[in-house]
Amino acid sequence: MLWHTYAMVCHYPLKIDAGEDGITSFVCELSDDDVETLQRFLDQYEELVMSAPGQNGVPCELTIHVEGGKTQITTTLPTRNELDILFARLRLFMLQDERTSFVKVCAILRRQFTDLRLVELLKSLHAAFHNHQSHLNTLLVINDVEINQEKMLMDWVYGYEQHGDDERRTRLRRLGIDVGHPSICHKLVYLLLNKQRAVSHLAAVVAVIFGRNTHVEFWGATLALDSKR
């Protein structure tokens, strides 16, 4: 066995192999509750992978053509059914009151990962999941106002996809954000896919802890189970 259980705490020996910079060994000490949360997170991620969007991909293309002073925007976007499936699979990671939310899983790992390389990895994934500007390739400016794209996405989620929140719908309208416009639809799908990619990277890390993934590479190092402990 690669782990042992004492007093309701599960021990998972891990190592970071940085090549010439050496190997760092450490142990994750997870409560039964933490283990259950992380295992559910992985199970739900596998359901996302096996869903139609996970298997077939999600179309998300935007083309802007300017000719004779006229601008034409064309998009290739998922169907309503494809978008509903994608959101249904992602919502358990997005909504913070869910047990397996991205934020809660990151918090569990952050309590265990003290190595600065892993701490920075989690920070980077957290920023990517929340669509921080450093992880976006464009600014969004409407009526000379720079739009917080993550807030726009979550207002759309709660206003149109999750609860029908009138306050959030009103906020979007006041900012001049037309969620039915092709360019905004493209942006919303793009932001959702950013979250999907961050979840995928985080799941790869969690899977290593339970032996459901042999290793994960990050920034010139490799995280894996330490079979010698």
Image (cartoon, rainbow, N blue to C red):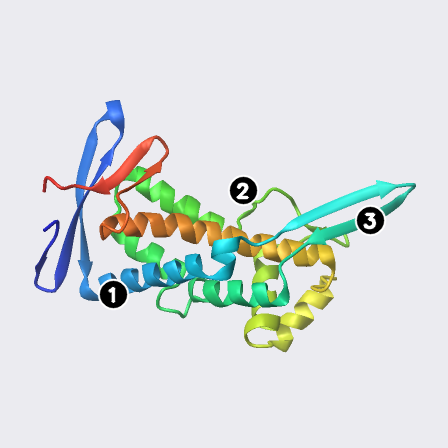
Query: For the residues carrying marks 2 and 1, which lies nearer the camera in this image?
Result: 1
Cα–Cα span, label 2 and label 1: 33 Å
For residue 170, side relative to residue 154 (left or right):
right
Closer to the camera in the image, 229 or 123: 229
- Report which quarter residue 191 is drawn in: bottom right
As helix, strand or loop, the secondary structure at mark 2 comes to: helix
**Label 2 to label 3, Cα distance in Å?**
28 Å
Q: Are the residues tagged 3 and 1 within 8 Å (C-beta)?
A: no
In the image, what residue occupies the spot 16% across and 41% down? Answer: 226
Which residue type carries mark 3? Gln
Q: What's the residue at 59%, 68% (across, down)? A: 81
- The reply, left or right, for residue 124 in relation to residue 169 is left
Which amino acid does the dot numbered 2 rest on?
Ser
**Amino acid type at mark 1:** Glu
Q: Which residue is mark 3?
A: 72
Q: Is residue 156 left or right of residue 44?
A: right
> Where is mark 1, residue-wise?
36
User: Is residue 69 shown above or below 56?
Assistant: above
* Residue 110 visible somewhere in the drawing: no
- Sequence order check, earlier mark of 2 and 3: 3
